[in-house]
Amino acid sequence: TRIKGMRPLINTLLRSIKALGNVVMLLMFFLIVYGILALELLNAGMRGRCYVDPVEGVNNFTDAAYAMLISQQTPFLAAPTVNIGGFNAGIQFCSTSKGGGYQCPEIAIDGHYYSMVCSKFKWCFTDWCKNDWNPNPFDLGGGHISYDNIGDAFLSIFQTLTMEGWSDLLYNHMDGYNAWGARFFHSSWVLIGTFFVIQLALAVLSDSFVSAQRDEITEKEREALSANAILKPDDWQGGLKNLRSEKLRQRLAQVYVIGDVLSRFRTSSAGDGSTTSSYLKQTKMKGLVTVLEGWWRAVTTACRILVSSSLFQNVIILAILCNTAVMSVYHHNQDLYETSICQRKCDLDGRMPADASDHCIGPLFNRSFTFDGQGGGYRPQQEEFCFLENDAQIWPGNVTCSGITDYHECHSTTPTNGVACHWFGSMTGGSCKLGLYDSGSFVAENVQNEGRGGTLSLRHICGDTLGQCPNFNPTWNRNLSVMNTVLTMVFITEMVLKWLGLGLSGYFSDKFNQFDCFIVMASIVEIVVEAFNDGNSSGSGISALRGMRLFRLFKLARSWKSMRKILHTLAVALGSLGPLTLVWMMFMYIFALLAMQFFGGKFRFVKADTPRSNFDSFFPSNVGHGAFLVVFQIISVENWNTIMFNCMTALNVNTPFASLLPVAIVTFGNYIIMNLFISILLQGFGDDDEDEDEPTETVTKSTPAKRLAAKFRSLVGRTSTPGMASANRIGAMSGDDANELQSEPSQTQNAAMLLARRVVPNKAEILGEEYEESDADPNMATLHVQFRGVTHDVHVPDANSLVCLKTNNPLRKWVAFIVHSRHFDNIVLIFIFITSVTLLLERPDDTIIADACPKPPAFLDCSGLGPGQTEQIACARDEKEPDFDRVWSACDSDGPKPPCCNIVKRVETFRNMDVVFTLFFLVEMILKIVSDGLVAHKHAYLRNPWNVLDAAIVAVSLFSSFGSGESLKSLKALRALRALRPLRVIKRNPGLKIAVVCLLSSIPAMFNVIIVVIVWFSMYAMLGVQAFKGLFYRCYNLQDQLFYGNAFYPASGFYTPTPALSGEKAAPTIVECIAAGNDPGTASWEDQAFSFNSYPTALLALFEMATTEGWLEVMAAVTDAVHTG
């Protein structure tokens, strides 16, 4: 309680105990319900395995097959046979119920097919075992992540609640139990538990924090009143401290300082005047000083006026934007980098002519896959590295490759120099180039000019600083450096002008100016260091200094009101988070020490190194991330379940109760402390909104965000400014209502009901013109239609329709009566529902198969096709299928028809239905145009945005249904826009329309926040590009899926220390990757799925990290990064 701001935080936690207890009781109720449901439905859902059916009489085994199956560690288990050489090397679960999950197929052993059966028990030589179950997967918490008992079920359900690893449980039980049953169980629990029940904790903590903060403010006000009561009237200093205006205090201090300086100047300038010469000298000096002071005042005044002008501020903003654009251009060009290596290799090769290096090109690695003829692909062994263009000009008279224009001739030609000819591009439009080296000659080529042995390294080729192999265009780099120098001069000029205009004290009194001065000094240091580095800007130190310029984007907050407001609110909220951050750190510190005591040095697993997320040390070290960071990882729930599994299977632990520690960290760290963190942050924005709601005499301005929101609101028929009606209602409230809005937290429900009545726009405002009475709009006319003896009023626009149809035209009158009829609207809704269902039932691959199916009288001939064929998509591929290598009759004959004929009928049925729907919606559109007019007047058809959407969908449907010819083939892809038809329901459902309006009305505020987020992401993205571009490449065998260069330890029960996580030995360089592995030419220098090679890819990587998914992989890649190449 001695720490400032800690008391409200403690009071919040104490106040929320009771309410959180209710939330926990509700959560426990659902846990018990879903736990019992899981025991009844999903029990032993991951114990089913496929066995080669050993029951006598089912399979007729050969002696070799029977000997192999009976001698397995688990007799007759089919998993080892199925998985050898397969893509899925894990456990295949199966369902024992017919029509349930995965059904065991037949299996081939030595060319013979045998039936398989799914069993949850092992085979005990003569019959299925009664008590010997198949084990649950050991990697899932030692087999405890299952629904076999209530304890394991609670643990599995809690893991699903955190939404980490729940999809694995879902997929496993889709195979082991039932696909739709597993989907419903896990999805419903995530929906109820995560999206509803857990969010109640956030609401409880937010309400408790507001109450505690209100009590703290009340107590402080009482203390302030008591202090003011005993304050002495003549205590000037105490009165000055209690002044509420900071600016007034500063002005008083400045007046005091100026007065003191002037008095001292006058005192020092006064003399006795005893001599005439001294008097004259003083007079001349005073005149000179007066002139200089006049010039100085003129200069400072002009500078002050200049820096305060809007033109100067706009120029600085333009310079900031130009600086940001310059920074976003930097990127890593891997093709240029590999070409640079090839050119340097040609320079070092004594056999190459002097001018040949300019024609040496990359890429070093062929990263493409070759079609294998079985529907897949493979990467062949690479035999050529580095290529030469125009080799016919370099070696005239020899057998060369550059003059060859035929694909087959290129591959069959053996050149005089180099290794072989290689074809680039397509078979008809490519070119032939000479491959210079193979994997051995590239790295083992003797270098004669400096006597450096026979094996080349990356530093031999690119120099000790690797600066001779650029990965960014040198011309661009020079131009960007010049632009950077010019922009730096602009910012230096700005700083000097502000020094002159504001003075040093006035300049440095502004925090933005202090920050700007620091950035300018960093830019000057960058220019100096780059100049001393001979213009080489690839060093890590220079990249770090260059990254400092990105923070100039914060200067936009000075002139951007919305951004300044959000940053100010965020700063205030973060300032109040100090006590909570201290509590959070204490929490992480305590649990990190506990984890080290329980699990330190115990994550030792056979055939694997120690995982990085371990508790062997407190801080990050060469053995892992450190316990403190791992606790933070668990709080972020990123792969926390893996840490829980490791705790449960740790050395000398191996108990499910070891999961209590990570579960406690998630419960208290994520669900309580993190939710309290969010509550305080939201409260800061809430206080800012309350300050906004104070009555001020301001004129509403139209901003781009408001105009964008107005466009969206017009889609749903709302034309009023959002919040205007609400503000009017609040201003017009009675005294009782206003008091009710200021009710205590115990009256929150009544206040919410009052807000629902008073603040939420009414139906007439949201539905707009559709709800207004026609007599209130002078542009609408009321017509009378006699139908079945009843007179009906019809409202139409008081203007001609389609030029020729007047308001009282009988045809227009009856058409208006039809389209405005409730029955017609219901028919439209029915058609929308039917077309939505047909869109759900359509399958894209049906169209492909139907187009490949021969049209009568042609027939399908599948004979002569080999196993795994891909020439005819409508024919069987597996020779085991009964329809393999078969000749079918035509689709309109009485003979056996191929299965694709049924698909053709289904596709034709859907196409005919789509034609009917298209014609119906076309008729609807025409009738509405006849009734309301096309576009000429206010209430015309195309004046309504929803009608514009309807017309666009109808036009696309017409093109896709009736269009033909090559020119309209591309429009077939627009058929996907038919999926927008269900949006038409929003227009016809008032309740749904209200919900959409409330959602869209939040766009203006979200727009400003999104801009701030983009600016923040952009700064980090460009900083990441400067620091980490090109550093995530690794040597990888794409065919065998193996990394080369990583530390490898043989299978052993002894613990081997984990090697350093970074360094030269962690991964080979790009040159070493050429000959890596036992079979050189199979590896490739591959990038990670995420990278900071350019501004767009850096944004994607940061967005992935912001979702708290995959941020550990990015951090590990940064940790292992050494240097480009």
Image: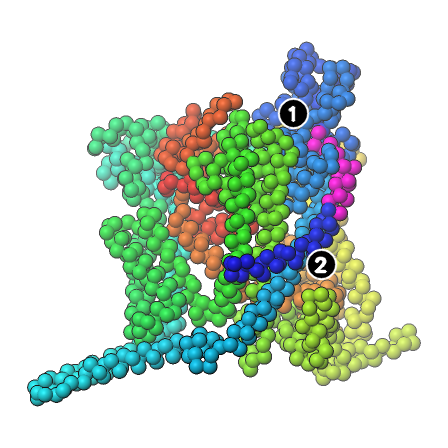
Residue wearing tag 1: 79
Disc 1 residue crowd, few under 14, some 14–19, many 20+, Cα 10 Å: some
Residue 483, quarter of the rendered image: bottom left
> Is 490 situated above or below 116?
below
**Quarter of the image with the C terminus in it:** top left
x, y percent for residue 236: 42, 79
Residue 232 vs residue 1016, the one in the foreground: 232
Residue 420 vs residue 477, the one in the foreground: 477
In the shown orientation, is residue 209 left or right of residue 529?
right
The secondary structure type at the circle numbered 2 is helix
**Residue 384 visible in the displayed image:** no
Residue 158, quarter of the rendered image: top right
- Judge whether residue 34 is colored magenta: yes
x, y percent for residue 27: 72, 49
CA gap between label 1 and label 2 equals 46 Å
Amino acid type at mark 1: Ala
Residue wearing tag 2: 982
Amino acid type at mark 2: Pro
Question: Does the CB distance between marks 1 and 2 fall below 8 Å?
Answer: no
Predominant SS along the magenta part: helix
Q: Which portion, as a residue range, is magenta?
A: 29-47
Residue 688, quarter of the rendered image: bottom right
